[in-house]
Image: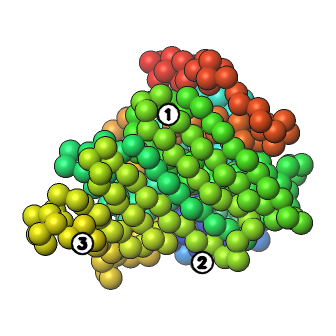
Amino acid sequence: MIRVGLVGIGAQTKENILPSLLQIPDIQIVAACDVSIERASEVKSYVRDVQVFKDVTTMMDCMGLDALVLACPPQAHRDISLLAIERGIHVFVEKPPCFTLDELNDMIDAAARKRVVTAVGLNFRFARPIQQLRKMAASEKFGRPMHVQINHYASKPRAPMWGLSSTLRSFLLAQTIHSIDLTTAFGPGHVANVRSSVQHAGDAMLAQIDISFSSGHTASILTGSMFPYFEFDMKVISDKSNMVTLDNLWNITLHDAEIASQVVGGDKRWRNAWQPGPLDSGYVRSGYFGELTGFFNAIRTKTRFEADFESMIPTYQVIEQVCAAEVQPGLVVPPATLHVVAEKQRSVARG
Ligand SMILES: NC(=O)c1ccc[n+]([C@@H]2O[C@H](COP(=O)([O-])OP(=O)(O)OC[C@H]3O[C@@H](n4cnc5c(N)ncnc54)[C@H](O)[C@@H]3O)[C@@H](O)[C@H]2O)c1
């Protein structure tokens, strides 16, 4: 039984994290903490014998916890993770784990020293349709993914969040973090080059981000808060002229030139479709169940979790580059700089 403490009993914990945790076997939520003790006490309605706290250090020092699951503002993710890691407690934090690449590197170093398992809540990566898309794109028959194209439309945030001064950084950390993370999941290699442009209209913005990876694959993301509502679609194109598309995190279509010629005599417009099963539970489909289960499995097997702090380095490199280019338009961070950070990533991985 893994003894879990929850931190930050706001909307995300109540709507997604807690219901998912309640479906996971062999873990026990023993404590809950929020700076508002009233919010922490709400967990008592769902979990028997849970102790509630308004101070996280007291909770960690009293409760003999194995793991913390946090859904707070990023500065609390950063500071509380470091306190937990120091005590040898494994940590899962909702995205974003922190504000900057430097802060992320400090968190990675601390976790490596204490050998704790870390995780960042990037539920898109674990959502059923994305898992299915990744499986298709990884097959030999599909070919080597050459390009990932993502349209990640949103209507907010349009103002700085969490005490930051930059709306752009807030938007990238709140929204685009998911899509940048996904572009890194479709091929090996580190970030070699990033080019971006950001346009503003009133308080809304539109950003185009192009990324090249050292392994040769590329990605482009069109994102921003200038759209009327949230919409997400992506395409992966392979070196065998196959293409898989995902519409609105739901429908997958495989455009396969070879099958088309075998099955329908060369009609190139033929395509194959996939959808989540109607009985997939909402938390499985949206990825929350999968990411939390993966975190606890990594604790049990003493292995790295695929979406750990270290896995976020390429994503934060891209965020830093996009923010720097807005301040100094046309600036492209020399690949050598990105390479130094990638080297650090490898040396941390080697322990
Ligand atoms: N994966 C996703 O797609 C997704 C979706 C929504 C939210 N989130 C993330 O979840 C996090 C929380 O979002 P939310 O909408 O629940 O916010 P919220 O404001 O509703 O809840 C945050 C809670 O954390 C508490 N808190 C703040 N500092 C604390 C501290 N030092 N110690 C203990 N408690 C503290 C606050 O009192 C509040 O109850 C954010 O980082 C957000 O980006 C992720």
What is the x, y in percent for residue 132? 32, 60
Residue at point 60% right, 44% down?
210
Quickly name the residue at label 2. 45
Estimate the spatial distance between the alpha carbons at disc 2 and disc 3, rounded to whole Å: 52 Å
Of residues 135 and 30, the one drawn nearer to the viewer in this rendering? 135
Residue at point 42% right, 30% down?
215
Residue at point 46% right, 55% down?
125
Q: Quadrant of ligand 1?
A: bottom right
Residue at point 35% right, 60% down?
244
What is the x, y in percent for residue 37? 77, 65
Estimate the spatial distance between the alpha carbons at disc 1 and disc 3, rounded to whole Å: 31 Å
Q: Residues within 10 Å of mark 3 (few under 14, many from 20)?
A: some
Tag of residue 270? 3
Q: Residues within 10 Å of mark 1 (few under 14, many from 20)?
A: some
The answer to whether residue 12 is visible is yes
Secondary-structure class at tag 3:
loop
Which of disc 2 and disc 1 is earlier in sequence? Answer: 2
Q: Amino acid at mark 2?
A: Ser
Q: Amino acid at mark 3?
A: Trp
Secondary-structure class at tag 1:
strand
Labels in figure, total: 3
Image marks 2 and 3: residues in contact by CB distance under 8 Å: no
Quickly name the residue at label 1. 213
The quadrant in which residue 84 appears is: top right
Q: Is residue 36 left or right of residue 290?
A: right
Which of label 1 and label 2 is nearer to you? 1
**Distance from mark 1 CB to nearest ligand 1 atom below 8 Å:** no
What is the x, y in percent for residue 175? 66, 58
Q: Amino acid at mark 1?
A: Phe
